[in-house]
Image (tube, rainbow, N blue to C red):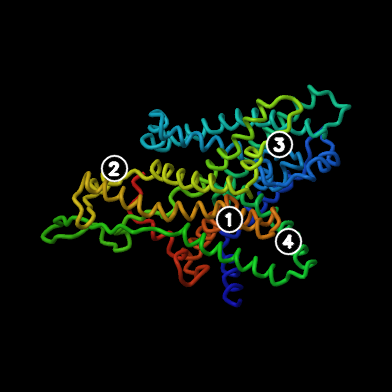
Amino acid sequence: MKKFITTLSNIWKIEELRNRILYTLGILAIFRFGCFIVLPGVVPARLEAATAGNAGNDLLGLINVFTGGAFNSAAIFALGIMPYITASIIIQLLGFAVPYFQRLQQREGESGRKKITQITRILTVAITLVQGGGYLTYINSLGAVDPSISPAVFWISNIIILSTGTIFAMWLGEKITDRGIGNGISLLITIGIIASLPQAFSFEAISQLNNNGLIIFVLELAILFAIVLVTVLIVQGIRKIPIQFAKRMVGRSSNAMPASGNRDYIPLKVNAAGVMPIIFAQALMFLPATVAQFFASEGSDLSASPILRALNDFTSGPYNIIYFFLVVLFTYVYTALLVNPTQYADYLKRQNAFIPGIKPGKNTADFIDATTSRITLPGSIFLGLISIMPAFAAAFGVNIGFAMFFGGTSLLILVGVVLDTLQQIESYLLMRKYDGLIKSGRLQSRSRMQGIGAPM
């Protein structure tokens, strides 16, 4: 405890780090404040009554978690930063398939990145307008709109407000990245997820204590802690491929380059795809029910279909089986898009480096491809298990709100963002020659373990 207090004192002593942390906290406070400002024309009491019976285990419940409850509250940040995330994913996928975006991402440097940022912002506005219209239709279907307000005024004004809210949230995220401690967009999503944790935690604690389930509640916390530890292990896990540099003559002596022994390997991440496979799989799992709603006749009950009911409930067996295999499949697909063995091989050749025992060129590319495929298998299986872990928690009696933190997108985002934020703080401490946040483990040396394997 004394070391922890000393570390916090060291953090406060570094003026730049202190200002960045305070600036970040101020921006996050502004974002959370906007999550409680209700759109004009919406009756909060009616909206709360209409959404009180929602189970929270569908797509709308997932969006509400990411927005910190702003979605169900019809706040000005109801769409949160999700349209920007959607636009970024679309642009990233276009970078794999469209030559124009490939040139912008890989060859045109800073100017290309600025063009991509501009295109992403424009696409964000377009997506927000479409999603805003759908969201207002959803609010109107719940009967939460004041009938005394003109429908035209309600729609036009709130479309503008929702779009402005998303653009403002995007601007806040960029400010955190520029003047805060980094990862602004991710921090906005994380703070929304964390905002729902205290309520879910207290609800589960009260429920278990009222049923004399103190031991069960402690066991739940122990299992959650173990899941977080394993998630951290997999997220930070890398496979090091050793490399050697060919010697060159410098004067009358021969030297290998570079001289440093800390950058003599290629780090391949066990989970290179991150959280993207889960996001894609969730989008596909919610697609059948969404399409069925468009083609359903008036007055028909979609919940009467056992297939649609199973595919829209994350606690059902068919849902989890299909979901697991989709996550594994998308992990391989997305890893193949991200990791380009040929590019790694060309980069090593340009650096006059090679993998011991492997010939340069095609053999090197094949070796990296085979290694990536082998380490992706356990990573994909782990990701699939994490994605269905909330269903197991709910099956053992954990309430749905708290079960969402036992795995899935919420846990991976929390772990990833927290680790990146700690790395930022760690780098400031080490640069000022203070002790880091931890004395051992990989976090302390993450900034030094990037290796040379970053040809992009």
Residue 248 at what x, y percent from top left? 16, 55
Identify the image quadrant of the N terminus. bottom right
- Gap between marks 1 and 3, in whole Å? 27 Å
- Gap between marks 4 and 1, in whole Å? 17 Å
Q: Is residue 172 above or below residue 354?
A: above
Q: Which residue is mark 2?
A: 342
Q: Is residue 28 above or below residue 253?
A: above
Q: Earlier in the sequence, mark 2 or mark 3?
A: 3
Task: Find out whether the residues at labels 4 and 2 contact each other: C-beta distance under 8 Å.
Answer: no
| Mark number displayed over residue 204 | 4
Crowd tier of the residue under label 3, counting other residues whose Cα lies within 10 Å: few below 14, some 14–19, many 20 or above:
few
Depth order, front residue of 444/392: 392
Q: Secondary structure at mark 1?
A: helix
The amino acid marked with disc number 1 is: Met
Of marks 4 and 3, the one in the foreground:
3
Q: Is residue 114 above or below residue 54?
A: above
Task: Find out whether the residues at labels 2 and 3 contact each other: C-beta distance under 8 Å.
Answer: no
What is the total number of numbered labels drawn onto the structure image? 4
Q: Earlier in the sequence, mark 4 or mark 3?
A: 4
The amino acid marked with disc number 2 is: Thr
Q: Which residue is mark 1?
A: 389
Of marks 4 and 2, the one in the foreground:
4
Q: Which residue is mark 3?
A: 304
The amino acid marked with disc number 3 is: Ala
Q: Secondary structure at mark 4?
A: helix
Crowd tier of the residue under label 4, counting other residues whose Cα lies within 10 Å: few below 14, some 14–19, many 20 or above:
many
The amino acid marked with disc number 4 is: Glu
For image coordinates 21% across by 50% down, the residue present is 352
Of marks 1 and 2, the one in the foreground:
1
Q: Earlier in the sequence, mark 1 or mark 3?
A: 3
Depth order, front residue of 221/121: 221
- Gap between marks 2 and 3, in whole Å? 51 Å
